[in-house]
Structure formats: C-alpha cells, structure tokens
Amino acid sequence: MAEMQAKAGKLILTAVVAGLVAAVVEMVFVLPIQAVVLHNSPEVVFQSIAMGARGRAAFTGGWTSALQGMGWHVLVSLGAALVYVIAAARWQALLRRPVIGGLGFGVLVYVFMIFGVIPLSRIGFTMPAASVLTLVSFAIHLFAFALPIALVARAMLPHPRAVALAPG
C-alpha cells in the first residue's frame, strides 16, 4: 500500500512539474510571436484563452479575464502532463524515446484542442486557416508544449533500464 502511494505521489509530482514547465515554455514562444506578428499584448493573449469559458465577454474583463485565461492555460497543461505521465508509466517506450513520444503526443494534443476542446468551448469551431501562423501554432504544440512534458517525465520517472535492474 505504501509503495503504491509513493508511486502515485511520484506520478503526480512529475505531472505537476511537467505541466508547469510546459505552460511556461509554451508562453515563452507564444507571447513574443503574438506581440511582434499580431500586435497582441499578454493581456489579450490570456483573455483569448479565457474566451473559451467566458465567450467574447473575456475581452472586456481586463486583467481579471487574463488571470482566468492563465489559470485555464495552466490547468490544461497540468491535465495534458498527467495524461502523458500516466501513459509513460504504463508504456515504457515513451520514457525510452521521449522525443518521438513527445512529438507524437504533441500531434494528439493539437488535434484534440482544435477538434475537441475549442469546438466544445464558447469559442466554437472554425476550420484552422492554412497559414504560416497555423503551422507555427502546430510547431509550438509539438516542440514547446508536448516535448517539454516528455522530457520532464523522462528525467523524473524511473528509467526503463533502471526498473529492469532493480532488485525484487
């Protein structure tokens, strides 16, 4: 029982660290692109995330809406990290090959966000435009969101070879 609790605690800690790292790394890329290319302030970026829950009213809520958007961004990041960490604990190939696993996970996350989360939110569904910004968004999901999750999971969870050599 204590061993199961310790393992669960390790998985949760790993998911929290991976989710927070992914949330920050993604914004390190998103915020400058939004500022330079689209002339959007960080407040507007996070309000656009809050729009999923609040609709267009998010843009009249000032920093209160922006903070809500930050909260949603972190929550989604933590949820995605938990999914990956649980999968990696069960499927050791994700720990042996974190780059391939992370990039594959990034594709799944992007598809889930575009065709699942956004259509069910107050934003509603529209087909993504085939543009450079769509490709940049896709790349950011792969390299600045999912890959950090996979690399943190690899760093924090027992390595597959270490597990095979462990006594008992």
Image (cartoon, helix red, strand yellow):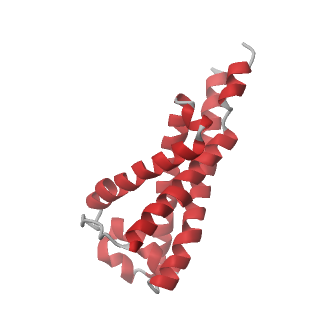
Q: Residue furthest top?
A: 168
Q: Position of residue 60 (x, y in %)?
A: 37, 83
In the depicted structure, whether residue 116 falls above or below residue 59: above
Q: Residue furthest bottom?
A: 39
Q: Position of residue 74 (x, y in %)?
A: 52, 59
From the viewer's perspective, tell me whether residue 99 is left or right of residue 113.
right
| Residue sitting at x 68%, y 32% | 159
Residue 15 visible within the image: no
Q: Position of residue 77 (x, y in %)?
A: 51, 55
Splitting the image into 4 quarters, where does residue 157 fall?
top right
Splitting the image into 4 quarters, where does residue 134 fall?
bottom left
In the depicted structure, whether residue 48 falls above or below residue 40: above
| Residue sitting at x 33%, y 70% | 54
Q: Nearer the viewer, residue 157 or 55?
A: 157
Q: Quadrant of the N terminus?
A: top right
Q: Nearer the viewer, residue 93 or 5?
A: 93
Q: Position of residue 112 (x, y in %)?
A: 35, 52
In the depicted structure, whether residue 54 falls above or below residue 2: below
Q: Nearer the viewer, residue 55 or 109?
A: 109
From the viewer's perspective, tell me whether residue 30 is left or right of residue 127.
right
Residue 147 visible within the image: yes
Q: Quadrant of the C terminus?
A: top right
| Residue sitting at x 29%, y 70% | 129
Total numbered badges shown on the rendered structure: 0
| Residue sitting at x 35%, y 73% | 131
Q: Nearer the viewer, residue 31 or 96?
A: 96
From the viewer's perspective, tell me whether residue 139 is left or right of residue 52.
right
